Image (tube, rainbow, N blue to C red):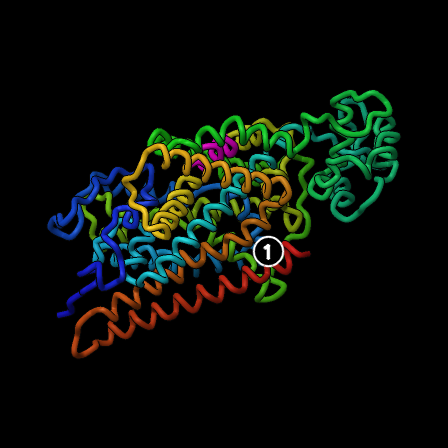
Amino acid sequence: MAQVSINSDLGEWGLSTDSGERARLLQSPSVDIAPKSEGEAPPGGLGRGTTSTLGAIFIVVNACLGAGLLNFPAAFSTAGGVAAGITLQMAMLVFIISGLVILAYCSQASNERTYQEVVWAVCGKLTGVLCEVAIATYTFGTCIAFLIIIGDQQDKSEVPPQYPPSPGGHAVGGKEHGTPAQGLAWARHSSGSPPSWLLGPLDRWRSQQRWRTTPCSSLASRSLLPPCAVIAVMAKEPEGAGGSPWYTDRKFTISLTAFLFILPLSIPREIGFQKYASFLSVVGTWYVTAIVIIKYIWPDKEMTPADILNRPASWIAVFNAMPTICFGFQCHVSSVPVFNSMRRPEVKTWGGVVTAAMVIALAVYMGTGICGFLTFGAAVDPDVLLSYPSEDMAVAIARAFIILSVLTSYPILHFCGRAVVEGLWLRYQGMPVEEDVGRERRRRVLQTLVWFLLTLLLALFIPDIGKVISVIGGLAACFIFVFPGLCLIQAKLSEMEEVKPASWWAMVSYGVLLVTLGAFIFGQTTANAIFVDLLA
């Protein structure tokens, strides 16, 4: 019979019993876990939680679904169509579920309650530090993506859709306008001043004067019309004015929202007051999916899809969709606390929980990805909600849901990243966590301000959420593949058996496969993100 000796002695792994080093840094705010007492080891290795099986499914679904949903239609376009996108997600689902089960097994064997603690205990100090650095980087990048999403939704809400006039266009409000397809084709494939048939008499002169200098011109590549001309009309600028109103500038609206709402929610030491905000996030993601599906079944007359891809351009194109899928399904970091919060934290029960949760998440992501892609084709925006008309009330409500969800999700992600940074700092300095409260407060405020200002600054100058996801999606692959694979290998190697059965070799081989596949995805997507998306 195999005997598992994982974490039998903290000294074996070069770990300290210092509470600052062993802090539960990433405990989910939606999960209540009683702290472990020193030397206390209840039957079964871990204390009993209070979360039911159904509750655990809901928490895992909530951890999985999020703002990454908006990028799935573009991921289907990148992968080469519906068939390629579905095949890729179904293949990934096997590894995603197995990674969650492996983490539960290692958590039970090592008697640890969080993702990074499991990696520390099973894989050792070096891998543990790398895991914590990866978590901090991932949460930092996700916070940047959240701020970009806020700017995207506010931009679209502020600019009403007025399609430019063109020959053969249709009349809207007594004035002839061009078709959306004509406006989209010009906005995506042309530069410089728009042709006269694209603008009405009121806009023609303004376009000639300000089209190249207005600060909103960066939005032209993803709009159905010159957006600054519309803002100018709305604001009723006097002739000779040189740009849109300052209060409609994207950088101003993102900064104002961040300082008024996100920063005050990020400074507190605890985030337990946000435990019920997860319900709003789940409702918002389901509502967005419902709107995308409904708009595909009953599309607006002015929405015509561009080219619908039927096959990927190359195998590399398929892998370029990996970051979005990894970013969307990554719930592994928060899965370990959820497992330990269950009334019956058993690996077999947990397997059913994560399978049910991933099937639900798969249905949401596939519904959004397929219908969004088929609605707009290859012209779908990296944020699918930006592809819809601004005056659509149902879509406007979806944008409001997304903004509220992001406003509550940023502080939670920031808390996780700040906690990891704090743990690394305390460990490096050799400082105990039980120190002067005033010093802790000053350090926490400083860490929060630096984190907040850096993410805000980067979000202001990276207007495309797809570029951020392409970078942090590679890190998500590490959490899904690499670290669970390493944990599985180390856990099996620690078993004391004279004769290794076939199942032992199968598990070790599967762990090697996970690490190899995860390293490949991370390297390929990160290199593509740097040399194609960021440096292009």
Relative to 178, does residue 310 appear above or below in the rendering?
below
**Element at label 1:** helix
Q: Quadrant of residue 199?
A: top right
* Coordinates of residue 241 in the picture (x, y in percent): 82, 25
* Coordinates of residue 54 in the picture (x, y in percent): 27, 41
Q: Which residues are magenta?
A: 401-412
Mark 1 surroundings within 10 Å by alpha-carbon count, few (fewer than 14), some (14 through 19), many (20 or more)? many
Relative to 229, does residue 330 appear above or below in the rendering?
below
500 drawn magenta:
no
Q: Main secondary structure of the magenta part?
A: helix
Tag 1: amino acid: Thr
The residue that appears at 39% across and 53% down in the rendered structure is: 132
* Coordinates of residue 531 in the picture (x, y in percent): 63, 60
Relative to 529, does residue 368 appear above or below in the rendering?
above
> Which residue is at the far left?
43
Instruction: Please indicate, yes or no, whether residue 47 appears anywhere in the rendered image.
Output: yes
Q: Quadrant of residue 14?
A: bottom left
Residue identifier under label 1: 78
The residue that appears at 12% across and 48% down in the rendered structure is: 42
The residue that appears at 83% across and 20% down in the rendered structure is: 238
Q: Quadrant of the N terminus?
A: bottom left
Is residue 199 shown left or right of residue 44?
right
Is residue 328 shown left or right of residue 115?
right
Q: Quadrant of the C terminus?
A: bottom right
